[in-house]
Image (cartoon, grey):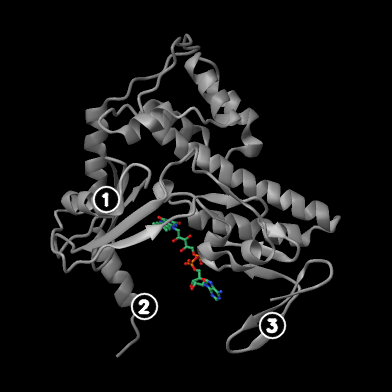
C-alpha cells in the first residue's frame, strides 16, 4: 500500500497486476477491512454491549420432501441465541447465532445438531466469528468501505445486503454533490452510521423484550442496562400509552424501520402500554378464522414454490 502526503491511498499492491492507482478505493475485503482499518486506522465501534452474539455455527441438512420447497426462512430461539433454516433449491442452510460469553463452540454445535436432528459426524459444522458493530467512519480519505468491511449486525433481520445497497446509493448521491468535499464525506458518514445504529436498536428490541428465564443468556439480554437514547424514548412513549407514531415520525431522520415494524416488535413480544389511551374512533375487529380461510382460498390460485423455481431454471437454461 502506498500513501500520498495528504494521507490518501495512492495505490494498492496486487499479486498479479502490480501497484494499482486510483482516485477512490472501495474496501470490500470483508471482516479483514484491509484498507480502511488496517491501513487508514479507522476505529471500529463494537455493538457487543447491545448485542451479545458474536459467533455462528452453520450446517446443511437435506430437503425433507423432494416435490416441495418451503418459501420462507424459519428462525427460532435457542438457549444462547437463535437458529435459522433457509430453504435452498438443493438443501436447507441452517445455523445457530450465539454468544461466546454464554456457550462454547462445542456445546453450540451439539445444540444445533440436536435441534436439526443431524447427528452424522460426516456432516461438518462450519464455525464463524462475527465482528459485530460498525466503523466510526465508512468513508475516510479516498477510501469507502462496503459490506462486511464497513460493519456487521447479526443476520436476525437479514439486513446486510440492504445496507450495501443503501451505502452505494448514498455514495452515488454524495459523488453528485457539488459541495465542500469534507462536508459531503461527513454527511455520508453520518447517514451510514444512522442506518447501522437504528438497525442495531431494532434488533436489540428482540432481546430486550424477551420473557425467557431458562438460561442466563436470555436473562442477561432482558436485564441489559445498555440502551440507546432512541430506544429509551420509544419505550417511554409506548409504556406510558403515548403517541408512538408521532415519536417515530419525530425520530424519522435517524430511524430505519417503519412504525409498523415498531408496533409489531413491541406488541409481538408482549409488551403493552401500562396505561392505554382511549380510542378516538371505532375500529372494526378482524375475524381471524375468516381471514385464515380467505388466505387458504387465495393460496389455491398460486403455483407451488418449487415449480416456480424449476420453471425459472428451465427458462434461463441454455438450449441444448
Ligand atoms: C452468519 C452470517 C449470516 C448472514 N446472513 C445474511 C442474510 O440473511 N442476509 C443478508 O443480506 N446478509 C447476510 N449476511 C451477510 C452477507 O453474507 C454479507 O453481507 C456478504 O457476504 C458480505 O460480502 P463482502 O463482500 O462484504 O465480504 P466477504 O464475502 O467476506 O468477501 C470479502 C472478500 O475479500 C477478500 N479479501 C480479504 N482480504 C484480502 C486481501 N488482503 N486481498 C485481497 N482480497 C482480500 C476475501 O478473500 C473475500 O473474498 C450474513 C453473514 C454471516 C456471517
Residue 72 visible to an observer of this rendering: no
Q: Residues within 10 Å of mark 1 (few under 14, many from 20)?
A: many
**Horizontal side, residue 171 vs residue 231: left or right:** right
Labelled pair 3, 2 in contact (Cβ < 8 Å): no
What residue sits right under mark 2 in the picture?
316
SS for dot 1: helix
The structure residue drawn at horizontal position 41% and vertical position 57%, both measured from the top left corner, is 129
SS for dot 2: helix
Q: CA distance from mark 3 to mark 2?
A: 37 Å
The structure residue drawn at horizontal position 22% and vertical position 59%, both measured from the top left corner, is 69
Splitting the image into 4 quarters, where does residue 36 fall? bottom right
Whichever of callouts 3 and 1 sits on the residue coming sooner in the sequence is 3
The structure residue drawn at horizontal position 40% and vertical position 34%, both measured from the top left corner, is 207
What residue sits right under mark 3 in the picture?
20
Please name which of the two marks, 2 or 1, marks the residue nearer to the observer: 1
Whichever of callouts 2 and 1 sits on the residue coming sooner in the sequence is 1
Residue 78 visible to an observer of this rendering: yes
Q: Is mark 3 within 8 Å of ligand 1?
A: no
What residue sits right under mark 1 in the picture?
108
In the rendered view of the protein, which quadrant contains the N terminus?
A: bottom right
The residue closer to the viewer here, 131 or 271, is 131
Whichever of callouts 3 and 2 sits on the residue coming sooner in the sequence is 3
Residue 48 horizontal/vertical position (percent): 49, 43
**Horizontal side, residue 155 vs residue 191: left or right:** left
Amino acid at each position: 500500500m502506498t500513501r500520498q502526503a495528504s494521507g490518501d491511498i495512492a495505490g494498492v499492491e496486487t499479486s498479479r497486476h502490480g501497484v494499482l492507482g486510483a482516485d477512490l478505493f472501495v474496501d470490500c475485503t470483508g471482516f479483514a477491512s484491509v484498507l480502511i482499518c488496517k491501513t487508514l486506522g479507522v476505529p471500529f465501534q463494537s455493538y457487543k454491549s447491545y448485542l451479545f452474539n458474536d459467533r455462528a455455527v452453520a450446517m446443511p441438512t437435506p430437503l425433507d420432501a423432494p416435490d416441495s420447497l418451503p418459501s420462507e426462512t424459519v428462525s427460532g430461539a435457542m438457549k444462547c441465541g437463535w437458529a435459522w433454516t433457509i430453504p435452498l433449491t438443493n438443501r436447507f442452510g441452517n445455523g445457530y447465532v450465539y454468544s461466546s460469553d454464554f456457550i462454547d463452540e462445542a456445546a453450540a454445535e451439539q445444540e444445533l445438531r440436536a435441534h436439526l436432528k443431524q447427528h452424522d459426524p460426516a456432516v461438518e459444522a462450519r464455525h464463524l466469528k462475527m465482528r459485530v458493530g460498525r466503523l466510526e467512519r465508512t468513508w475516510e480519505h479516498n477510501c469507502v468501505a462496503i459490506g462486511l468491511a464497513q460493519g456487521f449486525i447479526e443476520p436476525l433481520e437479514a439486513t446486510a445486503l440492504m445496507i450495501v445497497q443503501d451505502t452505494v446509493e448514498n455514495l452515488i448521491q454524495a459523488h453528485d454533490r457539488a459541495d465542500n468535499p469534507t462536508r459531503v464525506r461527513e454527511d455520508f458518514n453520518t447517514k451510514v452510521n444512522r442506518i447501522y445504529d437504528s438497525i442495531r436498536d431494532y434488533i436489540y428490541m428482540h432481546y430486550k423484550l424477551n420473557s425467557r428465564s431458562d438460561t442466563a443468556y436470555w436473562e442477561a439480554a432482558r436485564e441489559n442496562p445498555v440502551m440507546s437514547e432512541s430506544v429509551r424514548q420509544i419505550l417511554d412513549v409506548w409504556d406510558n400509552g403515548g403517541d408512538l407514531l408521532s415519536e417515530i415520525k419525530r425520530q424519522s431522520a435517524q430511524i430505519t424501520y417503519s412504525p409498523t415494524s415498531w408496533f409489531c416488535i413491541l406488541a409481538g413480544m408482549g409488551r403493552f402500554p401500562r396505561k392505554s389511551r382511549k380510542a378516538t374512533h371505532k375500529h372494526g375487529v378482524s375475524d381471524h378464522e375468516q381471514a385464515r380461510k380467505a388466505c387458504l382460498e387465495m393460496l389455491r390460485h398460486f403455483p407451488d414454490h418449487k415449480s416456480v423455481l424449476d420453471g425459472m431454471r428451465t427458462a434461463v437454461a441454455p438450449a441444448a
